[in-house]
């Protein structure tokens, strides 16, 4: 029995890994914008591969604010909570509250249920280029990356890559730093996020969800970071809507 259990895990995992060495879209980061984008694309039949550094996807949504596991979502994004079956209550002035654990679990479930594959415990350390276009990512195990071990990574290919890595904008940053390329920003570089301003941050999260280099898109807090916009704190409507916008523009870019 022990051999059968181990064989089942090894064979099924490596079949999944091999199948997704090439995908339509790779998403870096399993926070709310990345998970929503994965769901929306997978529902349309797009082959989506999402890499999450941590053991559990979900990003900062799990903890709410200060480990108070409630989040706030504004009226404009309520249709997404309803679509994903997430309970919510009106607090005031078009602001609704939801349980952060329920909300995060629902986003993960719907992404996987729609057909997106999620690889947790994987870190993206670089991008792959095809001329002047991002054509994939360079991936290693998170413990290998964290310990600084000298172990060569693997390459996963895709038609489009989404940087949903949050505040560090890791994919955009490594592309700019290692290659000296010009990004689609006023300075041509990662501009890094400004201090907290909820209204401006929420608006910028969606507005700056865009293609910043051929083949590379940004969403969520990475969109704020790349564009130099404000952070917004524990309000998540903009993050959810950013995921929807990312799915739309990526779908158009790959010919949906």
Image (cartoon, rainbow, N blue to C red):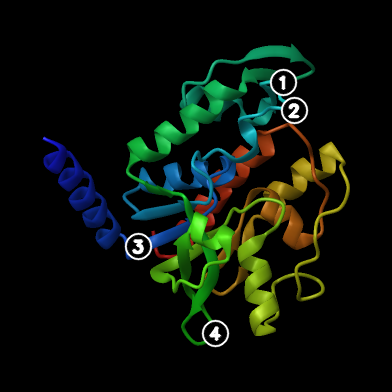
Determine contact: label 4, label 1, CB under 8 Å: no
Determine contact: label 3, label 2, CB under 8 Å: no
In the depicted structure, whether residue 133 falls above or below residue 83:
below
**Residue 241 found in image quarter:** top right
Determine contact: label 2, label 4, CB under 8 Å: no
Per the model, the C-alpha gap separating discs 1 and 2 is: 5 Å
Per the image, the residue denoted by label 4 is 132
Q: Is residue 211 visible?
A: no
- 1 vs 3, front mark: 1
Per the model, the C-alpha gap separating discs 2 and 4 is: 40 Å
Determine contact: label 1, label 2, CB under 8 Å: yes
Mark 1: secondary structure:
loop
Q: Earlier in the sequence, mark 4 or mark 1?
A: 1
Quarter holding the C terminus is bottom left
Q: Residues within 10 Å of mark 3 (few under 14, many from 20)?
A: some
Which residue is located at x 55 percent, y 25 percent?
103
Question: x and y percent of residue 32 in the render?
Answer: 57, 40
Q: Which dot marks residue 68?
A: 1
Determine contact: label 1, label 3, CB under 8 Å: no
Mark 4: secondary structure:
loop
Q: Which dot marks residue 86?
A: none
Mark 2: secondary structure:
loop
Question: x and y percent of residue 178 in the render?
Answer: 65, 80
Per the image, the residue denoted by label 2 is 65
Instruction: Count up the numbered dots.
Output: 4
Per the model, the C-alpha gap separating discs 1 and 3 is: 37 Å
Q: Residues within 10 Å of mark 4 (few under 14, many from 20)?
A: few
Q: Earlier in the sequence, mark 2 or mark 4?
A: 2
**Residue 254 horizontal side relative to residue 142, left or right:** left
């Amino acid at each position: 029995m022990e051999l059968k259990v181990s064989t089942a895990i090894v064979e099924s995992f490596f079949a999944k890994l091999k199948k997704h060495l090439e995908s339509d879209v790779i998403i870096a980061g399993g926070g709310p914008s990345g998970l929503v984008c994965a769901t929306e694309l997978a529902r349309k039949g797009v082959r989506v591969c999402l890499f999450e550094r941590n053991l559990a996807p979900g990003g900062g949504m799990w903890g709410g604010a200060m480990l108070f596991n409630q989040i706030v979502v504004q009226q404009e994004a309520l249709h997404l909570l309803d679509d994903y079956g997430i309970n919510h209550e009106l607090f005031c002035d078009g602001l609704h509250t939801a349980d952060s654990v329920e909300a995060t679990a629902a986003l993960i479930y719907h992404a996987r249920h729609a057909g997106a594959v999620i690889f947790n415990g994987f870190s993206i350390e670089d991008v792959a280029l095809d001329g002047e276009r991002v054509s994939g990512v360079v991936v290693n195990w998170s413990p290998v990356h964290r310990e600084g071990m000298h172990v060569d990574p693997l390459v996963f290919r895709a038609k489009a890559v989404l940087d949903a890595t949050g505040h560090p904008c890791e994919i955009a940053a490594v592309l700019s730093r290692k290659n000296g390329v010009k990004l689609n920003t006023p300075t041509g570089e990662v501009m890094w996020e400004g201090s907290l301003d909820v209204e401006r941050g929420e608006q910028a999260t969606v507005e700056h969800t865009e293609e910043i280099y051929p083949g590379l898109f940004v969403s969520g807090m990475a969109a704020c970071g790349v564009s130099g916009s404000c952070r917004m704190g524990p309000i998540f409507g903009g993050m959810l809507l950013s995921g929807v916008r990312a799915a739309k523009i990526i779908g158009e870019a790959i010919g949906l």
